[in-house]
Amino acid sequence: MKLIEVVADPGQLDILASFVAEQYGALDYWYSEIADDQRQSIRMLVDDENRQTVLDTLQHLLSDTENVRILVLPVEAVLPRPVEEEKPNAAKKTSTGSTREELYSQIEKDTRLDGNFLVLVFLSTVVAAIGLLENNVAVIIGAMVIAPLLGPNIALAFATTLGDRDLLLKSFKTNMVGVALALSVSIVIGWFWPPMTLNPEILARTYVGFDGVVLALASGAAAVLSLTSGVASALVGVMVAVALLPPTATLGMVLASGQYQLATGAALLLAVNIVCVNMSANLVFLFKGVRPRTWLEKRKARQSVVWIGLFWAIALAVLLFAVGLRVVET
């Protein structure tokens, strides 16, 4: 559960208290004193199941009102513990642990193309390249964890689900710049490094089978489930499971060494990971009930999901065919 605080004129808060807080089952609510700017706040203690409905209702009621702020605040503990009333005929909802607005605030941070993102991509690529060249699994895992490439892909799926064109373009741009930078750095490392030895860690990133497709699909779904349920620590495991950086670094280094057949395998693995993560993440967002608020936004979102979903489906079919050919060849 969390606190929803609304700061508005005192006259509006009476309506919110009687209509929203009581109608949608706020566990408790209370007022603050009127501030110097003649505004007052009301705080409502709302559980996870009703929080999205309360936020949507507040935005609808206050959409034409100026000088209003709605805040969602974390709650560490509540004492005494609220008693949950069981409703025998109530249907259980498939709800997320986080609201649409909370997810947006968290996911949008990973799409920012700033100096921190570029430095992290650069450093993680250097770490990954050294780990691959030295056949050091621990170093490679460290690069997987610090690499910021998973976030823009999750944001791309989230933007598709909401039909948010601005976020979609922003996440796509960040993703492409990140992959291009990692590829460029790894090519430079491949040029200047002594003759590269094809050790098991490098070879493992130049081959993908059907098990790799299943792994990427499952990892993308797990990433979204960890975000929507509020278990962000589980993302570390997802970063390791479906790492985008090692195949990118491998692709750059084998390209620099002129081993184009191996480069094809690394590029195929990278493409499979990107497509599968986006596709499964999109499906899980839909399954968890992440939707836009207004009717017009929902209409745009349906078009976005259909067209981009069709693109991912065709891309996956082509990649599966390519994977099948490589499996037969080996």
Image (spheres, rainbow, N blue to C red):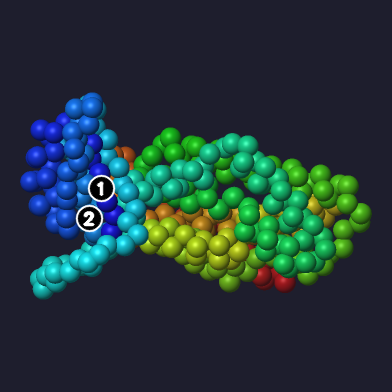
| Quadrant in which residue 225 is drawn | bottom left
Q: Residue at x 65, y 65 (%)?
A: 208
Q: What x and y, as percent, mark residue 18?
A: 7, 46
Q: Give the numbered dot on residue 4.
A: 1
Q: Residue at x 42, y 54 (%)?
A: 282
- Could you tell whether 322 is left or right of 204 in the image? left
| Quadrant in which residue 101 is drawn | top left
Q: Residue at x 23, y 36 (%)?
A: 7
* Mark 1 burial class by Cα count in 10 Å: few <14, some 14-19, many 20+: many
Cβ atoms under marks 1 and 2 closer than 8 Å: yes
According to the picture, the residue beneath numbered tag 2 turns out to be 46
Q: Quadrant of the C terminus?
A: bottom right
Q: Nearer the viewer, residue 55 or 316?
A: 55
The alpha-carbon separation of the residues under discs 1 and 2 comes to 7 Å
- Could you tell whether 73 is left or right of 295 in the image? right
Amino acid bearing label 1: Ile
Q: What x and y, as percent, mark residue 328?
A: 67, 71
Residue 329, placed above or below residue 129 = below
| Quadrant in which residue 11 is drawn | top left
